[in-house]
Image (cartoon, coloured by chain):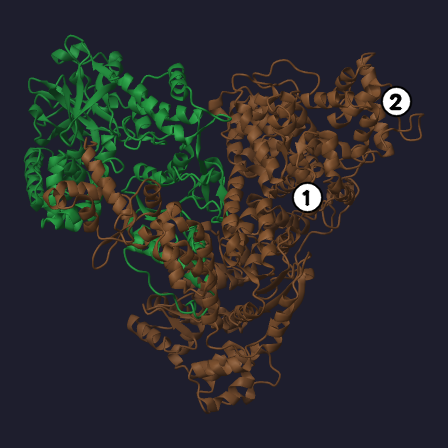
Amino acid sequence: MSGSLTAKALAPVIAEAPALVHEALQTLYDPREDPLDLDAVAVAARGVGRTTAAMLAMILNEDGLSEAFVAFLAAHARPLDRPAFAATVARLKAESDAALGGLVGISFDEEKLAAFALRSQSFRCRIRVNGKVTGSGALVSPRLVLTAEHVIATANGMVPKLEVEGPDDRRYPATVALAVPPHESEVTGGLPPAEAAAAHSDVALLRLDVPLGRRYAQVDLPPAPVPCAGKSAFVLVHFPGGKASGISFGEVDRSAAGALRQAHTAKAANGSSGGPGFDAEFRFLGLHQGRLGKVKRIVPFEQFCANADFRARIEGDRQMRYLWSLDGSPEGHLVIGRQTFFDALATIAAGEAPALRGIWVRRKSIAESAGLAFSHDLLSAFLDASAHRIVRLPTAIEVGDVVARLHAEVFAAPPPGAAPGVRLDETTRVAHDEDRARTLADAIQAQAVAEGRTIWIFVENPPAGLLQDAQVQFEHLVAELLVRPSVRLVLAGFETCVLAETVYETVGEARTGTLPGLLAEYIGEFTEADVRMTAAEMARAMGYDWGAAVLARIVRLALAGLPAQGGYYPVTHLGSVADRLRAEARREEGGG
Amino acid sequence: MKRAAGDLDALVAAARSFAAVQDSFAPEAALAAAMGPRAGQEPVVAARVLSALRQDCTVEAGKTERWLMRPAARRKILAGDVSVGEAETPVANALAGRGAFALEELDRMLAGETAPEELEAAAVALDRAGPSAPGFDRLDRLRGALNTRRAQARTDAHLAGGFFGREAELARLAEWIAAPQSGPPMRTIHVSGLPGIGKSFLLERVVQMTRLSLDPILVTLDFDRAGLNVLEAHGFFEEISRQLGDAVPDASAQLRALRLKSAERRAAETGTTARYSVPRDLLDAMAGAVKGTGRHVLVVLDTLEVLRSRGETQVMTLFDRMDSLAEYGVAPLAIISAGRGDALDPVPERVEDRIRLEGIEDSAARLLLSARGVPERLWPRILPLARGNPLLLTLAAKAFEDTAYDAGDIPAGASEETIGGYLYRAILSRVPERLRRIANEGLILRAIDAEALTGAVAPALGLTLTAEEARSALTELATHHWLVESDGAGKVRHRQDVRRAFLPLLYDGTTETRRAAEAINLRAAEWYGMRDPASALYHRLQATRFGHPMPGVPAELAREITGPILDELPAPARDAVLQAQGRRSGFARAGAPEDVPKDVGLGELPLPAPPGETTDVQVVGDGAGAPLADTEGRAKRAQPDERAVRDLELMLEKGDLREAGHVFSAGFGGALEAASPGALVALCYLWLAGRWAAAFDLFRGLPRSAIERALEESPHLRGRVLLEMQAEAAFGKLLTMLADVRIFDLARRSHDASQRTGMVGGALDFAFLAASQTDAVLPRRLELARSLLASAYGATDGAGDADYALGAARSLRQDFGLFHEPLEGGGPDERRPAVQAGMLQALNPYGAPLHAMVSGAPEGRIAAFLEGLRPRLPEAAALFTPDLRGTETLPDRLRAGPPDVVAALTAMGLCADWSSAHVIGRSLADLRLIATSAERWRRTVAGMWSYGAGCPEGWTGQPSEDRMSAARLDRLVIAPDPVAAARRQLAFWQGASDRAAGRFARWVAAARARGDARIGRPGEALTALLGVGAPGVVAVPLAVLTAHGVFLQAKGRGPDGGAAN
């Protein structure tokens, strides 16, 4: 379906949800290396008398990203073609009623069904072994795809070429992160012996290089299996015959708690294996295993949810505490020496340090500006846009009214006038500015609450300082924003200013602190430990089997010959260290 | 997905180059510049080019979209090779140095009376063009000129309406400014008065006058500014330097460069040493800048009540900073100030004169009445009644609108409050009956809207009000401009001056009004509930006036209760809010009598010292030299005020030791229950303030579980302090504790959580490294300790590690102008371990508690000793660190008395030396304890592990002497007259009391007993003396004397006559 996007389909979404389109483009394109921007597309389109939608459709089709774009929108509950989607939902509803209405008296809530149908399009995957579709799967974390083990098994035991065809219909190379085979007796429709069941749950986790789960959607595995309660509705997400026919409905027999396999009646075919099954509330129940005769069955979640390795791998992949690469792959921009930054972000995002209201990135050598603007890229790459909005506030001598500028950046409108009693002719300049800052901070807080997101203000360092009035305004703004619960600040530079009464030196300090403050991050050098951190995170995320000794060797090689003072390396060498780490990753992937 | 398109990259580069020399631009223009006609032919490529450019731009949305390149991106591009080409934009002109940006044009602009707009345009263009522009070096001056002109223009505009009256006050201020001070103690003429009375206006006027007559260098510090923090010496002086740079344009670039250096220096400092760092070079340069102009400096301190609200001692610190300015030579200097009420009460000696503004001038009152449209015929009745009080003017004007109003019933000689009450009631009586109670009792709400009226006020007052009636009442109320202000969105607020004057009448009035006030607060607390939690909390706090319980005050809500609203609360509620905000409560404020438990002394706190030894620091203000624990004192244990405990903890968390000291001496008047929160916080204060004897005394009284509990409950403060104390008191026991994985984990978290509180690179850090754990589980910030130890045991594989500590030591010395002669200049080889050990002494972390001890209330003898030592610092260097350079000018660089001398001694590497030498033979318990720790650290860093058996991994062998002492000994031995040289060293620290000489003799005797006959050589004697505990600074000369057969005895006791004297 490559090249299928049309201007007609795109136009409504551009008009109604430009921010979502912007976010999609940011996600699908690399904002540093290969950006595509909606504003820019609009200008270029105007220049040739076309619509933005037409131009964008053309580019997405040309770049082969139309499916990815559609999947992204679907993951964000925005079907591209609303009428067509409405028809699909109506069909699904009819199918489900037909399959289940008479059987167990279930009738799906149309709205929930529509939402699930959209989401399922964004987490479902095809599994290909040596190029052929052998089963279905689902994204369950940024890089892990859940499927049945027998889907990836090869008859001769040869190491297969594994690929996952993602929600965007693109093929991604995959490696096996976990594989628990079925029992041999299952080939003939039998059950594994009870004592061997745990070791034969027919489940596999495949690891991708690219964090597709972050880009699109993931199945949220429940913390504990849904309790068994007799016969109930069953929804299977799969690719029967390798085709994207979507969702099937049926009944699953969950009468016996602890049953090793459970029978279901949803339509399935070759290629359905490994597809995730859900109940009427769309809670995960288990994986479709296969069919023997007329009996189709699932491996219930109970059979593998307690597998410690399984849990640990998913948990490990979900918990991103350090962004080692801007795009999550070894080929992306590798991030070295920013552990404090990510520690702080992760801590804030997890709500673990209420007093920590942001980060103050300071340079050890103020003549250098490397790393300041990059902090914005890191922030964008790390934070989930659905829960965080980032506003970038430029500062320079030209920004004489910082309050007005920030207001414009947040609200795309000029600020209201000062309140009575604190107008410029009624009080001191300082008191006037303080009131304006307070009013704006209140407005931003209210906006954050209204959006249901934390608003992050990223403030760029003024290359040659600020004017005095702007400086005073800025001090007030920081003081006010620091105490707004839904606002966070990242200051890049400003080393000669006193901007926060409380500046924490470590995340630990901030965790126990009670006074709202910023965490100081000093940039300009990196250490061996920083390189080890990036390499270790890369290995963890990519599933490289780099033990301590290998890691130590790789780090040593990455730093070989580089000059250090007191164990600190100048940032000018980051590029070559990244190249060396990347080369190791390629070698690991077998490409280098 | 990166496209292999060199062509695209070139197009993007061209678009960026275009954008970099523009102001804001139409994106189409960038396309045209980069692609020409291709843009129309290849729209997809055009979109990609613009997409790349968009990353570097902000968008100004308007009628037509304009893009503007971000400053950092522009700088990056212009730093490369960019052709200005045909562009005729300001940025292009600035880059080419042409037109208005030719150097001579810029200089003309700076020299003349250029309009601020023109200056701004030039500054913006040069800022955008960056360092490649020929005129970029004029940017600092342009910015300074622009700041100055704007400030002046604002003052002039503010005063354009005319300034009437106050001649006497103006003359007094002008006279004061015309006779600036040249040295400390700096004093001010302080203008006080109610809000809105015209304090700042008066200061502005005098500034305007003196600008024309004297043209002083103006520095304005308005403490309403969030970024002014007197505790942050670097930031505070950096701000002053910024304003000096504006006023002295020729110096602005140098001051800016030094500000950056100062900021870098600040970044390098963590832990307790950061507290006493001062930007000395910057201060020197500021002094130079002022001297070069021949002008004097006028400092205007405004809104001082805000500064005082942060702590009683903050204004003291402010004036100390002013003293520093003068001491460094930023003089002559005049200070004028303004603030509400009693802002300067804590520093009466700094107030030369007070100007109290009781009311506005008659002429100003007439202007105000005129501006309000009050008929002139009423003025003669209004003016005498109002007495210049702006609120009374408003009320009287309103009252006399009713021609029938007779002010005759106001008693003669009534106070302003009474007059206000009469007028208020008179006006209120004319408000329609149905509105009157809403107008009056509605004051209790922070703001009123129709819902609050029907939901909270009406039910409490027993009124029945429909929604429509409420809306109509509010609309009518909003017309009473003398009473309320409307936000135009259905909410009205009582005028702030009305609230301030009349809200207390409701709370302190008749039983009936009090009952109504209570009912409204209770009802409002309930009604606001989840609608507006901050308002609900406010009313619950007000309800405490009537005996209702104090509610919990969540920090998030407390932050919304500020300013006048906070002032309205009863004192206990206000304190609860302040402390929840992390601010000082009203405890122990001047003028506020406090219930300090003074019936018992703090007799138990001082260390049970060796016989005859007393603590050198008072533990309580009135308990100096109190006898040691007595049974009566123990029986009368008293808990300090809870506010004092929290205040003390808050101040310690903020690192404000001075304010902590104030709270401590005012609030901790009784013997404390060991392990009570009060005792633990007191212990933390004592430890951080360098009052170690008393701290250890409390420490010893703690139960075993105290450390663990403190680590869990207060890892950032109590936990850290107890860990440090454990490390100093019983290093081995700490290692045993750390062997427990759970304790180790708690301790690690505490260490990570207390970077601002703890000593960096001290015994605790060494303990972590000695605890034989892997790097992965160790605290994050051990790099200094690791580097120190790497140097100490001469690690070879991580030889580079020592560089970190050496770099830190170098930059610390640099602050004092100290350095080692480089090797090529004949200086010592810094690779030699002994030389490194000497340099690293500058990082002795025990310099911080010594500094704190001396900064607090130092024992007079120590202060006198340090004062006397100041001019002799070069001599100290010659005797003990002969390779150190820059010491000749050191005495002149020190400005701040004994604490500065302590800082200098630490930087010289003599921290352990002076403290352990000076304490010999003296009863100085605190100094003795700190000196012991400092000496132990000194030896360890110099290669002699001195913390017991548990050496860190990698420490091989155990030398019997430290490298630094050995090197000193070598120097003494080869001196032309070793005995005389040794005597000079022993005598230098004036430790030569009789008792010192006796102590020396005892050490020698002990060494003899220990070393048998093997102290005939200096090296052997040194080993033996160090072994019996003689600090290195005396062990070295004693070793020489002993080896030369010179016997030491106490003065008058032996033939040698106590050579040490």
Identity of the amino acid at label 1?
Answer: Pro
Looking at the image, residue B720 sits to the left or right of residue A120; the answer is right
- Residue shown at 65%/20% (left/top)? B945
| Chain that appears green | A
Q: Residue B893, position in %: x, y?
A: 66, 44
State the residue position of label 1.
B899
The quadrant in which residue B791 appears is top right
In this view, the residue in front, B366 or A41, is A41
Image position of A203 with respect to B210: above or below: above
Image position of A80 with respect to B712: above or below: below
Q: Distance between the residues labelled 2 and 1?
A: 36 Å
- Residue shown at 8%/21% (left/top)? A270
User: Which mark, by number, is residue A513?
Assistant: none
Local SS, label 2: loop
Residue found at the very far front of the displayed protein? B104
Q: Residue B522, position in %: x, y?
A: 44, 62
Pick the quarter of the image with the N terminus of chain B. top left
Local SS, label 1: helix
Looking at the image, residue B402 sits to the left or right of residue B72; the answer is right
In this view, the residue in front, A72 or B475, is A72
State the residue position of label 2.
B1047
Q: Is residue B692 visible?
A: yes
| Chain that appears brown | B
Q: Mark 1 lies on which chain?
A: B
- Residue shown at 53%/79% (left/top)? B164
Q: Residue B390, position in %: x, y?
A: 51, 77
Marks 2, 1 in one chain: yes
Identity of the amino acid at label 2?
Answer: Phe
Residue found at the very far top of the displayed protein? A156
Q: Can residue A105 be seen in this view?
A: no
Q: Which chain carries label 2?
A: B
Crowding at mark 2 (Cα within 10 Å: few <14, some 14-19, many 20+): some
